[in-house]
Amino acid sequence: MIAAQAKLVYHLNKYYQEKCQSRKAAISKTIREVCKVVSDVLKEVEVQEPRFISSLNEMDNRFEGLEVISPTEFELSDGRKRSMSLWVEFITASGYLSARKIRSRFQTLVAQAVDKCSYRDVVKMVSDTSEVKLRIRDRYIVQITPAFKCTGIWPRSAAHWPLPHIPWPGPNRVAEVKAEGFNLLSKECYSLNGKQSSAESDAWVLQFGEAENRLLLGGCRKKCLSVLKTLRDRHLELPGTPLNNYHMKTLVSYECEKHPRESDWDENNLGDRLNGILLQLISCLQCRRCPHYFLPNLDLFQGKPHSALENAAKQTWRLAREILTNPKSLEKL
């Protein structure tokens, strides 16, 4: 048993060094290329509307607020805006700052900036959506989402976290995560019937990117997530796009709750943790439900075609079985 576990960990580490690292390097290169174009567009936007701040902050080889959805799809939600109180013309009759109105204004400004910027030959607006999406070099899609960063406060809708009976992540890490706060994003959100009321379109979407990154520090958590993302990119990029990197990140957080001790995340347990997450992913796909980690009433599979989820469950099962029964197969995966 121990020998089989060690063999799996050996092949996973080899996979990480060869496949995951080359994926990271390729994505980093793409991000630099994409961010040059986006930065140029946003500079034009800021000239027209100084309340939108254009500079993209790079820290530790990461651009703040940039999420990798897949190797060709990115989302940038930069929370550094001028104070909310300066956006008075976007306040609704009921006294709320309208996400829809700000996004509509931003979309108009981005469309004008695309025509003026120095990369205008390689960047186009994606027109069939109320989101602000750019197509760059006909290869990459970047969604730019207006956002407000809310540091040092924690939303009421996530007040139940952490659950009292679960020892992970411990009081110190909880304090760090809550201090990190959250972002308010202006993006389309649909109710359970799939339609959007005007009140919902004025509402803001909660996003916890930096808080989630804090949770995954220590042990082999980030390595495990990197392997999952690489497997997803290579084998689970399926019709109907049922799975993205965020599903993988969410399931790693749930696995941390199930295995709360730091020793559970030692390098020699990498195989067990990966197996556990893949089996949980299959279960979620079969139940057609993947709860958001901080907002469990929010289903991350909402709106995904059932056939796409079923297909993903079958493909994930094939992948998990292959890895478990024949770790050497990772050389070809």
Image (cartoon, rainbow, N blue to C red):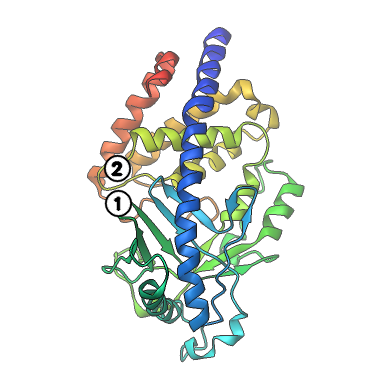
Who comes first in sequence, dot 1 or dot 2? 1
Whole-percent x and y of residue 100?
41, 78
**Taking the image as drawn, is residue 291 in sight?**
no
Whole-percent x and y of residue 30?
45, 48
**Taking the image as drawn, is residue 212 in sight?**
yes
Whole-percent x and y of residue 33?
46, 53
- Real-space CA distance between mark 1 and mark 2, rounded to the nearest whole angstrom: 7 Å
Is 28 placed above or below 80 here?
A: above
Is 229 placed above or below 267 here?
A: below
Tell me if 123 is positioned left or right of 15 in this view: left
Nearest the eye: 218 or 95: 218
Residue in the image at 26% along x and 48% along y = 240
Is 7 placed above or below 316 here?
A: above
> What numbered label is drawn on residue 304?
1
Extreme left residue here? 307
> Badge 2: how crowded within 10 Å, few (<14), some, or many (20+)?
many
The amino acid at mark 1 is Lys
Whole-percent x and y of residue 328?
43, 14
> Badge 1: how crowded within 10 Å, few (<14), some, or many (20+)?
some
| Marks 1 and 2 in Cβ contact (< 8 Å) | yes
Residue at which label 2 appears: 309
Nearest the eye: 118 or 306: 118
Q: Which quadrant does the C terminus fall into? A: top left
